[in-house]
Image (cartoon, rainbow, N blue to C red):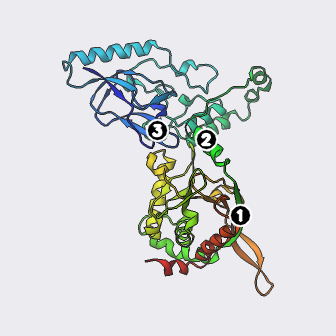
Amino acid sequence: MKQDFYLPDIGEGIVECELVEWLIEEGDRVAEDQAICDVMTDKALVQIPAMHSGTVTHLYVAKGEMARVHAPLFEMEVAGSVNAESAPDTTETAARSEATLEPERVPESLPEPNPESVSVSGDRESQALPGEGRVLASPAVRRLAREQDLDLKRVTGSGDKGRIYKEDIEAYLAEQTQPQAASPRRVEPTRRDEHASSHSEALTGIAAAMARQMTASLAIPQFTFCDELELGELLRVKQRLVPVFAEQDIKLTLLPFFIKALSLALNEFPLLNSRLNEEATEVSYLPDHHIGVAVDTDAGLLVPVLRDCQRRSLLEIAVELERLTTAARAGRLAPAELQGATITLSNIGALGGVVSSPIVSPPQVAIAALGRLQPLPRFNEAGEVVTRNLMMVCWSADHRLIDGATMARFNRRWYQYLQQPERMLAQLS
């Protein structure tokens, strides 16, 4: 018996999402809980599993289109609902025969199809040539391929089931550059200029979410406050703790210290962990410190949330931070792990930046951007030039609720915990 299967409710009020990749084809036999497709919500890549075993007979949504929650996603012949041996084989053969007659879907990045990349068989197990079969890659990787005029089917993916990552494209391009470096045929400016044209793309997924969020953010008045942090003692404490954390297979960075110190400072300045209602007539103080940490990924900037930081130890924060960062870069964060931050840290210094003016993400009332840690010359109390380990931090805050003096005092308390890490020990219960 054939049944339609619907896109389930992913949560957080999501009503539609982009279908990034089908992991199966029409005619494929699938097992219960096998991954069927990848869909992209505003900020997370989610895999949809099969609810039953059977044979997929029809895909309702094309790759790149928007799938709606509670609308048909695919149709399948449920295992056990037809006579076991002959009927499934007939259905599968017919579906695969139709697949071979359909034109190959060429990625949007190509100006024209490559005849070497056209599939000659619908049988998945016969797809052995590098240019055959479907391509598994994130939207960011596909965008990079478009920018390089590269057919993704020529690239060998290093991920699960041949998924292509940015590093695979870079390695492929590096290989291609070496033998062609001396060839003058590589440069054809006249030909490309003759055919150059502008094009438009719809904003989807993370890019669309950022456009909406930043538009809402700039509707509120906000200001930026910057200060220079001296972190020499914190670096020495971190160095002593590195082997302790290594025993738990955790690579210790400075970020867990910043998160824990921030939570301790919020205990004394609860206004920074509050919400202002839409009419700006009432403020709600939040009891828990859910700290968002911006992570740079191939799909764009994601902000996973470390929950209940006021109850977590430094070790627990480091473990959770590593888990969330790994999941974010693999595109496997659950939607709930990207929701509910009460305040945010953005580490622009990890990309080499020194100063940044972050933008408050409502309904939060504050966000900090951490700059690059640098050894710089400064004068000591005796007037001598010495080397200091300095980092610039820039706070932005909702000026309807927070004024400059409050932000300066809050930052000073946060800095005291970082400048003198033993102060954190005194506050731990």
- Say which residue label 2 marks: 212
Side of 247 relative to 345 (left or right)? left
Amino acid bearing label 2: Arg
Res 148 quadrant in image:
top right
On-image quarter of the N terminus: top left
Residue 314 in sight here = yes
Closest to the observer, 322 or 274: 274
What amino acid type should be assigned to the residue bearing mark 1? Phe
Q: Is label 1 in contact with label 3 (beta carbons under 8 Å)?
A: no
Q: Is mark 3 on a helix, strand or loop?
A: loop
The answer to which of marks 1 and 3 sits earlier in the sequence is 3
| Residue located 59% across and 25% down the image | 108
Q: What element carries label 2?
A: helix
**Where residue 374 appears, x then y in whole percent?**
70, 67
Residue hosting label 3: 14
Mark 1 lies on a secondary structure that is: strand
* Tag shown at residue 106: none
Asked whether 155 or 362 is in front, the reply is 362
Counting other residues with Cα less than 10 Å from the Cα at mark 1, is it few (<14), some (14-19), or many (20 or more)? some
Query: Label 2 to label 3, Cα distance in Å?
Result: 14 Å
Left or right of residue 22: residue 231: right
Looking at the rendered structure, the kind of residue marked 3 is Ile
- What residue is disc 1 on? 225
Q: Which of marks 2 and 3 is nearer the N terminus?
A: 3
Tally of marks: 3
Separation of residues labelled 1 and 3 (CA atoms):
35 Å
Q: Which residue is drawn at 46% across and 63% down?
A: 288
Q: Distance between the residues labelled 2 and 1?
A: 25 Å
Asked if disc 2 and disc 3 are in contact, CB closer than 8 Å, the reply is no
Q: Residues within 10 Å of mark 2 (few under 14, many from 20)?
A: few
